Amino acid sequence: MSEPQTFWEHLDELRSSLVRMIIAALVCTIVAFCFKDALFGVILAPQNPDFITYRLLQRIAECFSGTGEGGDMLPLGVRLINTGLAQQFLLHVKTSAYVGLMLASPYIIYLLFRFVSPALYDKERRYAVHLVSSGYVMFVLGILLSYFLIFPLTFRFLGTYQISHVVENTVTIESYIDTLLMISLSMGIVFEIPVLCWIMGRMGIINAGMMCHYRRHVIVALLIIGAIITPTADVFTLLLVSMPMWLLYELSIFIVARVRGN
């Protein structure tokens, strides 16, 4: 370990790290705010009928149809609207802040690790590097899965669902962005399940046999969690969110079995 520091030296270093984190987040937020067209070009892409997920589903449908025609999936038939005078500006600021924090997160994690690492032994530091890096990668994978699969399918199903042809589908931009951010954040957190199970497996709290024994209970719990984090009340979205959690749990069983050697 490094040479011990006094309390005031630790406090100064912590203050310096916090200032750098805030500055990095603000700079990234400002950059995201300035590139409005590119930012919302990415965010609003899933409402475009030509989005990559819809095109892939179209090709899959054509392959399975046997005739080369899988049916026209277009158009979506959803119109985004704004209902508040200052709503678009406030959404611009809020979305920029979320994206800015995401862009600055690697540097923020680095600063946090640099602050904590002097108190760790070399072996602990190596474990911490693997743990933090794998946790960050899994969080990003969760966001990508949400953006390219879960949210587009949810938006397409709910946005095109009609109880009658006389009712036009119009979705507020606030509802669209809030749903996208909520699902993305939730899936990012959910993808930390294997990392948390690895930690508990290393600590001897859980083992693969225990996880297999309580599999049915966990599936019910995952459905409940999916219902809580799902911003809509439909079964379709619930299953889209719960299915990756179940697959991650099965992956966690394999990881814990490798860690515990059982």
Image (cartoon, rainbow, N blue to C red):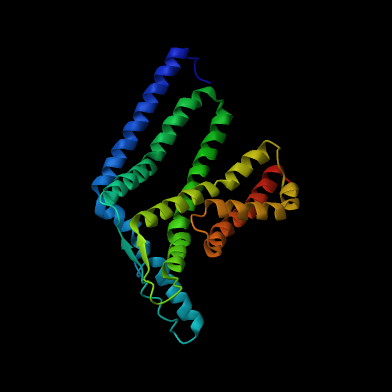
- Whether 4 is drawn above or below 155: the answer is above
Above or below residue 224? Residue 124 is above
The picture quadrant where one finds residue 167 is bottom left
Closer to the camera, 100 or 166? 166
Question: Is any part of residue 191 visible from this angle?
Answer: no
Q: Position of residue 216 (x, y in %)?
A: 71, 55
Q: Nearer the viewer, residue 226 or 188?
A: 226
Up/down of 161 relative to 109, above or below: below
At horizontal 28% and vertical 51% (from top left) the residue drawn is: 88
Q: State whether residue 100 is above or below residue 15.
A: below
Quarter assignment of residue 30: top left
Q: Residue at x 42, y 70 (%)?
A: 160
Could you tell me residue 104's position as x and y percent?
37, 39
Q: Quick one: 42 or 236, which is closer to the camera?
A: 236
Residue at the bottom extreme, as displayed: 67
Res. 115 visible in picture = yes
The residue located at (39%, 22%) in the rendering is 15
Between 95 and 27, the one lying in front of the other is 95
> Where residue 131 sits: x, y (%)?
54, 39
Name the residue: 70% across, 38% down: 205
Number of disc labels: 0
Provide residue 53's location: percent of width, then percent of height.
42, 66
Task: Kindly indicate the quadrant of the structure image that contains residue 93.
Answer: top left
